[in-house]
Amino acid sequence: MNKLLPITTLFMLVFFSIGLSASVDDNSIGKPSDHVDYVVMGKSINHRQSVGAKLNLLNTVFFAEIFPIKLNSSSPTITDAYLIGPGDAKVGMEFSNEKVPFLAGIRGWSIPELTKRYPDDTYYFNFNTPGGIIRNLPATFAQQKNIDNNPGPIKITLFQNNKITQPDFINPNYDIKVTWSPFEKGERDPNNIIDDMIYVILGNCHGEEIEHSGHAISNKDALTFDKREFVISSDKLESGEIYQLEVEHSNMETDSYRNIEIIVTYAATTFLDFKTKGNSSELIECPVNPYAMDGGQTDRIKKLN
């Protein structure tokens, strides 16, 4: 004969069922590749372009990044990240604790000087994710003998109304067409992961990014090596303001490990300031030199929050 369960027992069964369900959901967080999109390691050479189109060397740098699947997550999903490898990386290099963990080595004045500190060899990414840990994810610089994989210095040219315009005389009422010297070493990826990339980034005088041409892999419309221009809408511009432009050519080698894509890049970047005509309406005035929006701008200071 069936008996009615006491009400307290029913409540306990309900709570146990809910708790078990929550426990199962909390642990159903997949694999590391469900949280990490791709990793990047590279060597870059940075120049600043003057108003007169002269290129001045700023520095060279070794760097690495880890890109999460959810770039807009409210908190970091990749933690305790570090890189080990030859040279200065032998003792281990820690990544930042940001949403996109990042590290940069000691900067130099040439790629050969940089390579003495960070040899062309294999390095290993290590990090934790909600889906488990990754240890010894390999990324290798594959510099071929007697072939320089680094893109050449980039010269930027600006157009408005189909005419070349000077960086210190930009009309804020018209779009800006940004062009650059050809990416001669760029090519398609034989692994079909990502072709060699071009990035165009616009920042304001306070070092804040306000436009980006798109990230590798996560943005399908991002610029590849064969593109020759990028248009900045006049909607992004205000009168009497200083802006900073960044153009990067990224020569990439690709691979994958446990379904996490790997990009190893030799890159070149040029920075160019431009100023719009008219009177500024901004409450916070621009400094004489804009605050740095990129670590490669070693001739600029970062804005303190």
Image (cartoon, grey):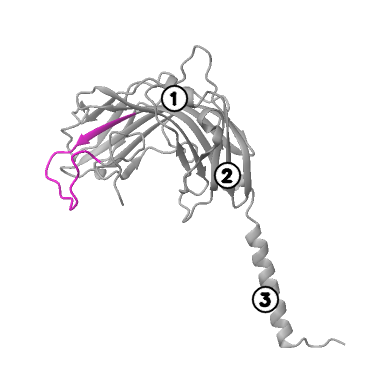
Residue designated by label 3: 15
User: Which mark sits nearer the N-terminus, 2 or 3?
Assistant: 3
Residue 278 horizontal/vertical position (percent): 12, 42
Q: Residues within 10 Å of mark 2 (few under 14, many from 20)?
A: many
Residue 107 horizontal/vertical position (percent): 40, 30
User: Residue at position x 78%, y 88% from top?
Assistant: 4
- Distance, label 3 to label 1, CA atoms, is 60 Å
From the viewer's perspective, is the residue at label 3 or at label 1 nearer?
Answer: 1
Residue 161, above or below 102: above
Q: Residues within 10 Å of mark 3 (few under 14, many from 20)?
A: few
Which image quadrant is residue 179 in? top left
Which image quadrant is residue 1 in? bottom right
Farthest residue, direction front:
91
Amino acid bearing label 3: Phe
* Label number found at residue 145: none
Farthest residue, direction right:
1
Residue designated by label 1: 114
User: Residue at position x 52%, y 24% from top?
Assistant: 119
Element under disc 1: helix
Amino acid bearing label 2: Phe
Q: Nearer the viewer, residue 202 or 81?
A: 81
Element under disc 3: helix
From the viewer's perspective, is the residue at label 2 or at label 3 nearer?
Answer: 2
User: Which mark sits nearer the N-terminus, 3 or 1?
Assistant: 3
Q: Does the stretch in magenta take in 40?
A: no
Residue designated by label 2: 127
Amino acid bearing label 1: Leu
State how many labels appear.
3
- Distance, label 2 to label 3, CA atoms, is 36 Å
| 73 sits left or right of 178 in the view | right
The magenta span reads 270-290
